[in-house]
Image: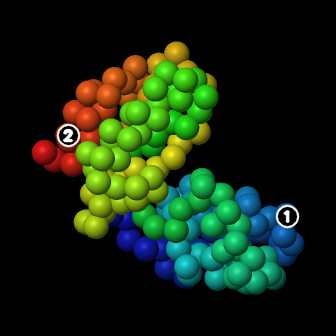
């Protein structure tokens, strides 16, 4: 797991953003692109840099599903919530994965080895229904294939 960024690193990363609410999203995206998540310390640093409140920055982080406040698990399954995947049985795929991993959507195992999150359609609908495992498409899933995949991720 990547070590937590220092305050100095965080300050340097967002130093060129000018105060103003219009820069909250770009600053947060930059932090997440670099570190994979937005820590509490990063929220404080972004708020200070943009001359706004940590509450406002935290509100933005928690409003958008794309932002995360914890490091990624070792293996992350993102379930596609898009219409083509759902039309082709995506909800049954999600249920099968959730039951096998024993996780809610948005949940992670206690040891941070794996997690399940909602993903958005990225245009690869020809492989629906699908999930992404650490960003790689696993498509044309059946319920049994989804269970096999989840067991593999779980180490069963
Ligand atoms: S709807 Fe799932 S990839 Fe497009």
115 or 9, nearer to the observer: 115
Q: Are the residues at dot 1 and dot 2 in contact (C-beta closer than 8 Å)?
A: no
Give the structural element (helix, strand or loop) at label 2: helix
Position of residue 64 measured from the top left corner of the image (x, y, whole percent): 66, 58
Q: Secondary structure at mark 1?
A: helix
Which image quadrant is residue 10 in? bottom right
**In this picture, is 70 found above or below 51?**
above
Report whether the residue tagged 2 is closer than 8 Å to ligand 1.
no
Residue at position x 47%, y 31% from top? 90
In this rendering, position of residue 107 left or right of residue 151 = right
| Disc 1 from disc 2: Cα separation | 43 Å
- For residue 152, which numbered disc appears in the image? 2
Mark 1 or 2: in front is 2
- The residue carrying mark 1 is 22
Left or right: where does residue 109 sit relative to residue 81?
left
Relative horizontal placement of residue 126, taking residue 108 as reference (left or right) = right
Q: Residue furthest left?
A: 156
Count the numbered circles shown.
Answer: 2
- The first of marks 1 and 2 along the sequence is 1
Mark 2 closeness class: few <14, some 14–19, many ≥20 residues within 10 Å: few
What residue is at 46 percent from the left and 26 percent from the top?
A: 89
Residue at left offset 21%, top offset 48%: 154
Instruction: State whether residue 100 is above or below residue 68.
Output: above
Name the quadrant of the N terminus. bottom left
Q: Nearer the viewer, residue 116 or 69?
A: 116
């Amino acid at each position: 797991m990547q070590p937590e960024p220092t305050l100095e690193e965080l300050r340097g990363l967002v130093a060129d953003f000018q105060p103003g609410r219009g820069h909250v999203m770009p600053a947060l995206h930059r932090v997440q692109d670099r570190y994979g998540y937005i820590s509490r310390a990063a929220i404080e640093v972004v708020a200070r840099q943009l001359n706004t409140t940590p509450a406002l920055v935290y509100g933005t982080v928690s409003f958008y599903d794309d932002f995360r406040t914890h490091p990624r698990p070792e293996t992350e399954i993102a379930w596609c919530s898009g219409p083509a995947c759902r039309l082709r049985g995506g909800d049954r795929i999600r249920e099968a994965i959730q039951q096998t991993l024993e996780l809610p959507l948005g949940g992670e195992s206690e040891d941070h080895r794996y997690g399940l999150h909602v993903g958005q359609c990225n245009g690869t609908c020809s492989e629906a229904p699908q999930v992404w495992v650490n960003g790689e498409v696993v498509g044309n899933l059946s319920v049994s294939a989804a269970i096999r995949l989840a067991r593999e991720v779980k180490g069963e």
